[in-house]
Image (cartoon, rainbow, N blue to C red):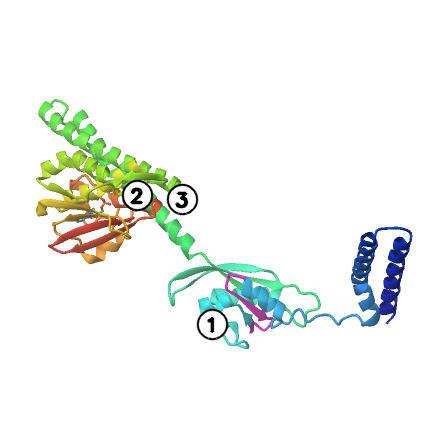
Amino acid sequence: MRRAVSGWAYLVAAALVSLAAYLSGAEPAFAAILFGLSVVAILLRNGADQPVARSETTPAPAPVEKADASGPVISAVLGAIELPVFVLGRDAVLREQNRAAEKAFGALEPGLHISARFRSPSVLDMVRETIATDEPNQIEHSERLPSERVYIVRIAPLHIEGAREDLFLLSFKDISELRRIDRMRSDFVANASHELRTPLASLRGFIETMQGPARADPKAQERFLAIMLDQANRMSRLVDDLLSLSRLELKAHIAPDQMVDLVPVIGHVRDSLAPLASDLEVEIRLHVPDGKVEVLGDRDELVQVFENLIENACKYGQEGKVVDVYVRNPAGGSVEVSIVDHGPGIPAEHVPRLTERFYRVSVTDSRSKKGTGLGLAIVKHILTRHRARLIVRSEIDQGTEFTVRF
Ligand code: ADP
């Protein structure tokens, strides 16, 4: 009431000041602006007064029941967290779970003991220990169903002032993907070392033989030297491919920005593979449309892609005698290059894994054909950078088609 009265008094004062200004010769517009500014000032002042006024008229609010896990603020905060989290009471009974937890572990009825969902003794021991000591804890925990997942499970007491009860936050950080990448990395290092170790062991064996038993046998030495050159070449192919992969990984996120005409690229690849094709008695036939077929790309990398695919088609589809390369540029559709061989084909179970590093349908077959097992991994890396896809269709005894779709 007192605030309303003082508001009116200010308003009357403002009107009087403006009127006085007008009467003392000021422009009417200036007097009007003065009045407007005074009103705004009064309103702002009243606004600033409000908390004080409220504290005068209303009693101090009772402490908010912040600790009530079903409170809307806590629910909203939990809902915004992308980690699955559960709120437990000191009795280890579930008070609340967020949407991420519902998605990961299914909806749980509030009021259930946490052991109704997580039976792992290590999780339950950890929960028990934190409830007893009020100290945060974390462990690694795997779930097998519905799919294999690895989590860092952490429990920490929630210190909420004026809470009705003690609460604990149980959170699950999914590290399955990190684990998978770690495993891939260590498999890769193991595979790469193994691939290098084999030719190295063979080189060492031949050197020892030439220093010992074959010391005075020039014929044997000549034969061994040829094999040693072969092994050294294999090692250098492997190192080249490994370096190529690591260079590609470094620029994986930079999309190429040059326009490249695929027709001369494919022509160049056919010419550079002509000696290999003729050794294998394979004919490479090109089917290209008239005019340019341009895509955004890096020319050297695209040469590498088509060299790998056409070389594989010649090597592994040798018995089909012909490798067809189709370049298609449909109006309104995606540019496609298909490399089709008429060889033995690839059993379906191998197809999804062909682009993994060192994956080969037959290791001896690949080695005998100077393969490193990295060609298709390099192709996949380059195509990912080009935002293009590799589609593999294969039928046993009919042949294989690798299509690059831009
Ligand atoms: P490699 O160096 O062994 O050729 P790639 O990564 O280029 O490695 O190919 C992986 C494997 O895929 C090869 O070892 C081979 O078993 C299989 N493969 C690739 N292309 C063909 C094809 N056109 N026909 C049959 N098998 C193929």
Snapshot quadrant of residue 208:
top left
Query: Does the CB distance between marks 1 and 2 fall below 8 Å?
Result: no
Magenta-drawn segment: 81-95
Residue 85 coordinates in the image, percent (x, y): 53, 65
| N-term-proximal mark, 3 vs 1 | 1
Residue bearing the label numbered 1: 117
| Along the line of sight, the residue nearer the viewer: 314 or 205 | 314
Q: Residue at x 61, y 61 (%)?
A: 135
Callout 2 amino acid: Val
Query: Looking at the image, is 20 positioned above or below residue 262?
Result: below
Q: Residue at x 11, y 54 (%)?
A: 398
Left or right: 305 in relation to 322:
right
Q: Can I make out residue 372 in this image?
A: no
Residue bearing the label numbered 3: 253
Nearest to viewer (mark 1 / mark 2): 2
* SS at badge 3: loop
Nearest to viewer (mark 2 / mark 3): 2
Give the CA separation, mark 2 to mark 3: 18 Å
